[in-house]
Amino acid sequence: MSIVLVPIGEVDGKVLEFIGQALERTFGQPYSIAPATPLPAQAYNPYRHQYFSDLLLRLLEEVEAPGAERVLGVVDVDLYTEGLNFIFGQASLRGRDAIISLARLRQSFYGLPEDEDLFLERAVKEAVHELGHTYGLGHCPDPYCVMHFSNSLADTDVKQATFCPRCSQALRLSRRKRSASI
Ligand SMILES: [Zn+2]
Ligand SMILES: [Zn+2]
């Protein structure tokens, strides 16, 4: 079983590799990077200048990835879902697929000088967080746990890229249950 990263639209290959390596360490599974698929025009909302995340997630669900335990879509455009101004990512709870957006993780998005290390760190946290949801984990009250909800990047920067003991255990149980049911 593996984790497959699917770039949707133009995404920096070095960033994908960095995320993949971190996921490999965190989830103990090899990663691979699928060929990029184009951003679907119908997911773009010209009034909001954003892409509708739900539609991208549905398209991901149709991606064939034999041997993939998890599929992570990565976009470098701004995402939204109904009722929210923007989202950093989205996951199908207890499903195979999740998606993250890199657009709001750069300092330059906020008119600040770029910080590549900080950007990569944020990308990894969002990726681990969304994959955590696919294993059925909800949001965690511990502000340092990767499953803590990020209302803003300030929250993302406080939390670590790792699971707190409680979430680690929930993750282990969820993955054990899954392999037992195969
Ligand atoms: Zn979440
Ligand atoms: Zn936690």
Image (tube, rainbow, N blue to C red):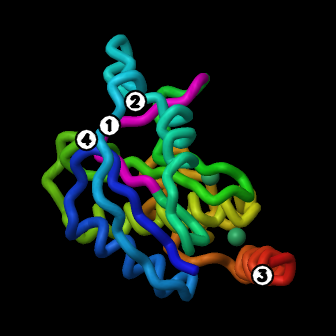
> In percent of the image, x 53 and y 42: which residue is there?
57
**In this picture, is 45 found above or below 1?**
above
CB contact under 8 Å: marks 1 and 2: yes
CB contact under 8 Å: marks 4 and 1: no
Q: Which residues are magenta?
A: 73-82
> Which residue in the protein does label 1 denote?
39
- Say which element carries label 3: helix
Residue 166 in view in this figure: no
Residue type for callout 2 = Tyr
- Residue 51 is tagged as 2
**In this picture, is 89 found above or below 20?**
above
Residue 150 horizontal/vertical position (percent): 54, 51
Of discs 4 and 1, which sits in the foreground? 1
Residue 21 lies in what quarter of the image?
bottom left
> Which residue in the protein does label 3 denote?
179
Residue type for callout 3 = Ser
Number of other residues with Cα within 10 Å of mark 4, as a class: few under 14, some 14 to 19, many 20 or more? few
